[in-house]
Image (tube, rainbow, N blue to C red):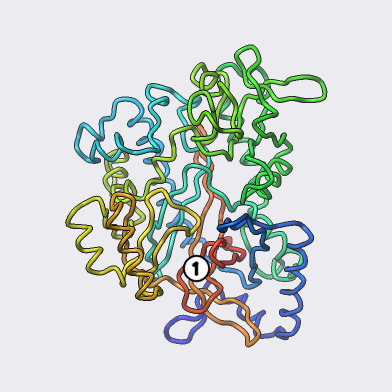
Amino acid sequence: MIDGENSVRGPYDDYHKWFEAEELTRIARKAEQSEAFFRRTGITFNVYGEDAADERLIPFDVVPRIMSAREWRKLSRGIEQRVSALNAFLHDIYHRQEILRAGRVPMSLVANNDAFLTQMVGVDPPGGIYTHIVGTDIVRTGPDEFFVLEDNARTPSGVSYMLENRETMLQMFPELFSKIPVQQVSNYPVNLRRSLAACAPPMCEGKPVIAVLTPGIHNSAYFEHSFLADEMGVELVEGHDLRVVDGRIAMRTTQGYKAIDVLYRRVDDEYLDPVNFNPDSMLGVPGIMDVYRAGGITIANAPGTGIADDKALYSYMPEIVEFYTGEKPLLQNVETFRCSDEEHLKYVLDNLAELVVKEVHGSGGYGMLVGPAASKKEVEDFRTKLLAQPSNYIAQPTLALSTVPIFTEKGLAPRHVDLRPFVLVSPDCIEITPGGLTRVAMTEGSLVVNSSQGGGTKDTWVLEE
């Protein structure tokens, strides 16, 4: 909100004037009410511990993150370029593999990758779309410096928090939205349904039937699954509600089984089809991959997209963008060391206390080391894990992440943040919701923003022109 010269940054002008005129006790009261609203609405997530899942309320901060229309345009162009390249890459590696033959990405990185599904080789997903919904994690290090931290192309979560954060702010501070022109995000569910319908399979007849597949109530993002199904006006189903009927995937209804055209799945590949993948899975649908390959259903996101999330592959994204678009990346990557590389591993081991080390298939902030914040014992324990399975890890420098204000008992205080914009991809267009989910490290000095590690969220405002 305040720049290095103690001046209010442009996007925050109107908000800062409003804040200075407000009584802190009123804002504190509204912050308490927002927490009660989240609790009443049931906006929770599960954190998985050693014994069982622990259901928690996600911390919410009432001070919005505000971006100008100019900043958002720059980000949007870069995100669109990156998502287009990712989709082209996925089509290529499951078909001609030209990028591998050109030597721009190592063959071994794909061939030896658990996320690469041989069952998808030669399969053309409806509309040619693999990544129907993408969440791109972005960090800011300067006024015009944005870096992509990682791509989430499997089952990106958090969009329900984006929508509920805005709804909460509208209820708590309606006067702000009459003073400040903020672009809306509330049309996301309508846009999601329209985008999914545009990817209907060849066997679809008439208006596409859409459903959301959830692993069930014990999943960490179950609130989001039920929320999105409700907002789109479609059925929320579990694996046991579905079966193959006449070459289609059909869901059980009170009138019998009804064919589904598009399944927005929130179940990982491994558990999607016990016939084709993990035979012990109780979450998926036996035979769904056979129906998919025959053009009887659209699965969003497409099976096999998980390889685009691979953190080792992430380091090749500049090459991937250039290979498929013919352009230099508009958004930069964070410098990344692949621990499978002998020289990279030596550097990482020598500088472990200064780096952030992540599992290549990790998510949610689990299984990572933040060197500067770790104890000597934690660093040495991680060194042992790294030496045992170096190919399982990548490392990155600790970035000087930007901060935004949060509301505390003493007023405003800076905390580190990242941003996850949500992207919808259909054969017709790429649509990016203006804003996204700002995740904030609620602890002073912390760089870990994941809700599973104590992070919170805040509303993200993109201003009109």
User: Residue at coordinates 42% horizontally, 83% vertically from top-left?
Assistant: 4
User: Is there any visible trace of residue 465 in the rendered image?
Assistant: no
User: x and y percent of residue 145 in the render?
Assistant: 37, 65
Q: Quadrant of residue 458?
A: bottom right
User: x and y percent of residue 156 in the render?
Assistant: 53, 47
Q: Secondary structure at mark 1?
A: strand
- Residue 211, above or below 9: above
User: x and y percent of residue 275 in the render?
Assistant: 52, 23
- Residue 3, above or below 209: below
Q: Which quarter of the image is occupied by the C terminus?
A: bottom right
Q: Quadrant of residue 39?
A: bottom right
Residue nearest the observer in this picture, 123 or 310: 310
User: As drawn, is 64 to the left or to the right of 352?
Assistant: right
User: Residue at coordinates 66% horizontally, 85% vertically from top-left?
Assistant: 409
Name the residue that disc number 1 marks.
Answer: 417
User: Residue at coordinates 50% horizontally, 49% vertically from top-left?
Assistant: 135
User: Is there any visible trace of residue 67 in the rendered image?
Assistant: yes
User: x and y percent of residue 362 in the render?
Assistant: 43, 52
